[in-house]
Image: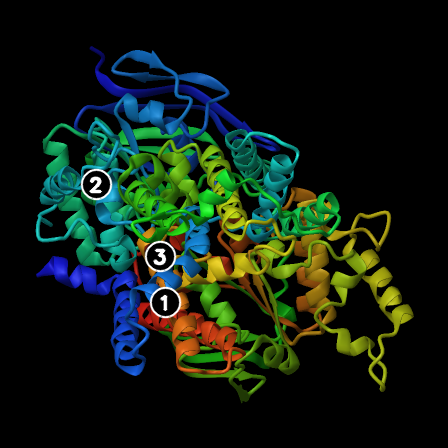
């Protein structure tokens, strides 16, 4: 029975129970909720944030933090669209787009780990830098008229399921297995939990930190390209506010700003909870202006429960 | 094969400004527990970190089983069979027991994925060493008691399969019962042929567990001996035994007034100290000695309202006070000079001038709430001259000053408050000799003006040189009181280490 007790004690279990309760409640409250189109819409809505969440959990586990992902989404989307418009073949444009995302992450990681500037300040600068750069290169205009083969990345369906959902699910599963089981990625838990101990255990702390930022940039790039393909155009405002929603979901899912804890399953459940709340409020006809408020309340509640339960033991 | 499993020869290690180790030798036989003792700053920790591969010695050599080795990292030392159990826990609180013990060495399969089953089995095997097979290896370390965390730390070191285990103050966070358990475990491992280097302040422990002992003083080896051929007096004499220069000025008994400034009665704070009673008179300097962690700083902070006591009575000039915040204490006339000037005492990136007035801005504030800049400057200039703060400019930032000058600024900020009672926690830590004697002179002047001083200090010569009376704390209790003229380093150490109890009057 200890394994059962262990599961119950996990943060993931708590979020899962909340999601389950909401699921059951909504099934009765709205006839439209438990339908495949609605559930696919919920999944499609969360997929772009879930992709970023995969890398963000790993980064936050290692004690890092990235405010710039929303801007990276916009910048990679816009630069990929511009390359496509100039006639570049789709695979090459996508590849360069991804490299740009990863390079921005590398830049953040280098400044945080090697120069030693605080993660919040560094990535807050990047948030403005790359949003600004997006506006500069696009002159503030959205970029449409993208090749059909590119749009397939975001619009194709496999047995009725849209590609963004498929991409997100694949990355979530691979990410969860790696972060849970691979010795390489578990190094990040040591770094976030006790950096000094990590060094003494022979973990290359700086290299792992830089890698974590690079992956976050790369995944924001994936998200940006998929988003552009799905919308059929690059929008200069794409991804704005996304960083806060992703970080919120990751924290609801059990990660902490202090590092050392968190899981991708938890982050997915956090994103799912936020998406279901939004969906529920819409279906129940609650004023849309309440959505942001409810998300804030959910975050506070999740963290409160966690803090209080830790204090009691 | 050499007679010694581990040997250090003429180890020298210098840090900027300090020679931490000056040609130290240490010889460890197979299967023995070798104690390393000395006062704070004698070089014990530096020697341990050098043997553990964290520091590289400037000179000298380390031999493992007679063969010279060179450690560039703790990993190298582990590879040669030397493991260190750190005093400051090196565990990751958010990870499980198993992942802490096998940090970054988890058993993996071909795909480099952690084999949890084997990891947990290996951990259970180690846990049986200490009869803890009932403990679930997947429990997070932050759910364990400090004592159990210590056990995990030791198991982590043992998991490297060492032939030498270095323990740094392993009992500092353990209860007596847990200490006995630890000793039983050490003996068990000793029987398996493991050798130990055991660092401790508690002399009694050394006679309980060690076979041999090496005494360090000021970075040098004073002597080594077999434990069953010596007694505690021998150890204490060798640990101390340094000449005391007269930089403390002269004690003036006639200056001590009749009025009691501070009277503390049965003061307790859970987990820090209990049932503390003493008093300090006008113009008196009372030294508060004891080992690090004995509860001295906590006591001082309680009187100052920073960590209010749970029970007991504090009287200031006969009036009962119960400060709940430092501000309340300052307003009643209590000052507190912290031991941690960089984090708690000074605002490092403020100027000298602004620091000097930081805790009594009210004195420079006009009726409508504005600060009088000219008065502040006048005060700062006077302080600079009074306290001999060496600086070209009062607008110099404090972090540019030497430790001694920083400390003088800190002293100045608290003298300026005009306290009736000043608590000084480690007043000369990290301060050069010249500034030290300046600070001592200032303390005598302040006492001469009738201020009561409670001086918390781990620097024994300072305690002996400055105090009219010495209180010794041990393990949260007041172990005894010694009049200044009867005090010797030996009887203070003996009280602090808990080898004798009660008042020393002879």
Q: Which residue is rendered at x = 54% and y = 50% of the image?
A: A66
The residue carrying pointer 1 sits among few (fewer than 14), some (14 to 19) or many (20 or more) residues within 10 Å by Cα, namely many
| Labelled pair 3, 1 in contact (Cβ < 8 Å) | no
Quadrant that contains the N terminus of chain A: bottom left
- Seen from the viewer's position, the closer of residues B171 and A303 is A303
Residue A253 pos. (x, y %)? 36, 61
As measured in the structure, the alpha-carbon distance from the residue carrying label 3 to the one carrying label 2 is 36 Å
Residue A16 pos. (x, y %)? 27, 65
Residue B393 pos. (x, y %)? 86, 51
Q: Does residue B35 lie above or below B487 as drawn?
A: above
**Element class at badge 3:** helix
In the rendered structure, the answer to whether residue B35 lies left or right of residue B506 reads left
Q: Does residue B299 lie above or below B490 as drawn?
A: below
Q: Does residue B218 lie above or below A39 as drawn?
A: above
Residue A121 pos. (x, y %)? 63, 51
- Chain letter of mark 2 equals B
Q: Are the numbered discs 1 and 2 placed on the same chain, yes or no?
A: no
Q: Quadrant location of residue A265?
A: bottom left
Q: Quadrant location of residue B236?
A: top left
Q: Are the numbered discs 3 and 2 placed on the same chain, yes or no?
A: no
Please give the label number shown on residue B155: 2
Q: Which residue is mark 3?
A: A268
As measured in the structure, the alpha-carbon distance from the residue carrying label 1 to the one carrying label 2 is 41 Å
Q: Which residue is rendered at x = 85% and y = 82% of the image?
A: B366
- Seen from the viewer's position, the closer of residues A274 and A256 is A274
Q: Which residue is rendered at x = 28% and y = 68% of the image?
A: A14
Quadrant that contains the C terminus of chain A: bottom left
**Element class at badge 1:** helix
């Amino acid at each position: 029975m200890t394994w059962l007790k262990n599961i119950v004690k996990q943060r993931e279990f708590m979020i899962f129970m909340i999601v389950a309760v909401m699921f059951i409640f909504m099934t009765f409250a709205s006839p439209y909720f438990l339908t495949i189109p609605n559930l696919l819409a919920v999944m499609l809505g969360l997929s772009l944030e879930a992709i970023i969440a995969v890398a963000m959990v790993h980064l936050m586990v290692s004690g890092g933090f990235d405010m710039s992902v929303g801007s990276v989404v916009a910048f990679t989307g816009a630069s990929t669209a511009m390359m496509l418009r100039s006639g570049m073949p789709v695979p090459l444009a996508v590849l360069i787009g991804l490299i740009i995302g990863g390079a921005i992450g590398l830049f953040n990681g280098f400044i945080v780990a090697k120069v030693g500037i605080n993660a919040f300040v560094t990535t807050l600068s990047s948030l403005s830098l790359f949003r600004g750069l997006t506006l500069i290169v696009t002159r503030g205009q959205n970029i449409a008229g993208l090749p059909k083969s590119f749009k397939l990345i975001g619009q194709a369906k496999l047995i009725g399921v849209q590609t963004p959902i498929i991409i997100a699910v694949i990355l979530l599963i691979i990410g969860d297995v790696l972060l849970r089981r691979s010795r390489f990625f578990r190094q990040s838990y040591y770094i976030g939990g006790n950096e000094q101990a990590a060094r003494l255990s022979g973990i290359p702390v700086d290299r792992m930190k830089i890698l974590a930022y690079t992956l976050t940039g790369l995944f924001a790039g994936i998200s940006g390209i998929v988003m552009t393909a799905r919308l059929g155009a690059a929008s200069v405002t794409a991804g704005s506010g996304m960083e806060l929603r992703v970080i919120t979901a990751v924290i609801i899912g059990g990660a902490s700003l202090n590092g050392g804890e968190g899981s991708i399953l938890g982050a997915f459940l956090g994103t799912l909870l936020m998406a279901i709340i939004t969906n529920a409020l819409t279906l129940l006809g609650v004023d849309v202006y309440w959505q942001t408020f409810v998300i804030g309340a959910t975050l506070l509640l999740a963290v409160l429960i966690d803090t209080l339960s830790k204090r009691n033991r | 094969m050499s007679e010694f499993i581990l040997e250090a020869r003429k180890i020298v290690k210098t840090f900027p400004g300090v020679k931490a180790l000056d040609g130290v030798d240490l010889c460890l036989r197979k299967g023995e527990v070798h104690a390393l003792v000395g006062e704070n700053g004698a070089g014990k920790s530096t020697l341990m970190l050098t043997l553990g591969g964290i520091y590289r010695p400037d000179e000298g050599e380390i031999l493992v089983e007679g063969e010279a080795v060179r450690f560039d990292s703790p990993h190298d030392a582990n590879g040669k069979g030397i493991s260190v159990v750190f005093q400051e826990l090196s565990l990751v609180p958010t990870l499980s027991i198993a992942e802490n013990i096998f940090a970054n060495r988890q058993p993996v399969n071909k795909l480099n994925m952690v084999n949890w089953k084997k990891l947990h089995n290996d951990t259970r095997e180690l846990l049986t060493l200490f009869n803890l097979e009932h403990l679930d290896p997947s429990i997070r370390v932050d759910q364990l008691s400090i004592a159990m965390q210590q056990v995990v730390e030791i198991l982590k070191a043992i998991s490297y399969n060492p032939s030498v285990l270095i323990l740094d103050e392993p009992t500092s966070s353990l209860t007596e019962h847990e200490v006995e358990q630890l000793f039983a475990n050490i003996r068990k491992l000793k029987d398996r042929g493991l050798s130990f280097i055991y660092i401790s302040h508690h002399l009694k422990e050394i006679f309980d567990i060690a076979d041999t002992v090496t005494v360090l003083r000021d970075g040098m080896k004073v002597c080594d001996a077999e434990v069953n051929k010596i007694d505690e007096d021998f150890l204490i004499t060798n640990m101390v035994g340094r000449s005391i220069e007269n930089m403390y000025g002269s004690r003036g008994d006639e200056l001590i007034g009749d009025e009691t400034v501070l009277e503390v009665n049965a003061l307790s704070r859970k987990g820090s100290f209990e049932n503390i009673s003493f008093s300090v008179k006008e113009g008196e300097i009372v030294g508060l000695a004891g080992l690090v962690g004995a509860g001295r700083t906590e006591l001082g902070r309680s009187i100052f309202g920073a960590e209010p006591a749970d029970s007991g009575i504090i009287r200031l000039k006969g009036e009962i006070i119960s400060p709940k915040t430092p501000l309340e204490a300052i307003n009643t006339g209590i000052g507190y000079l912290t031991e941690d000037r960089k984090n708690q005492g000074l605002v490092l990136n403020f100027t000298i001038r602004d620091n000097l007035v930081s805790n009594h801005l009210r004195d420079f504030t006009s009726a409508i709430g504005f600060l009088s800049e000219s008065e502040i400057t006048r005060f700062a200039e006077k302080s600079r001259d009074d306290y001999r703060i060496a600086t070209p400019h009062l607008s110099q930032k404090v972090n540019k000053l030497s430790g001694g000058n920083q400390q003088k600024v800190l002293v100045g900020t608290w003298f300026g408050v005009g306290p009736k009672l000043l608590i000084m926690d480690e007043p000369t830590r990290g301060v050069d000799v010249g500034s030290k004697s300046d600070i001592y002179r200032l303390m005598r002047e302040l006492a001469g003006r009738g201020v009561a001083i409670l001086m918390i200090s781990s620097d024994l010569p300072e305690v002996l040189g400055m105090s009219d009376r010495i209180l010794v704390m041990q393990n949260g209790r007041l172990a005894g009181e010694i009049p200044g003229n009867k005090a010797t380093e030996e009887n203070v150490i003996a009280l602090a280490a808990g080898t004798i109890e009660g008042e020393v009057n002879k």
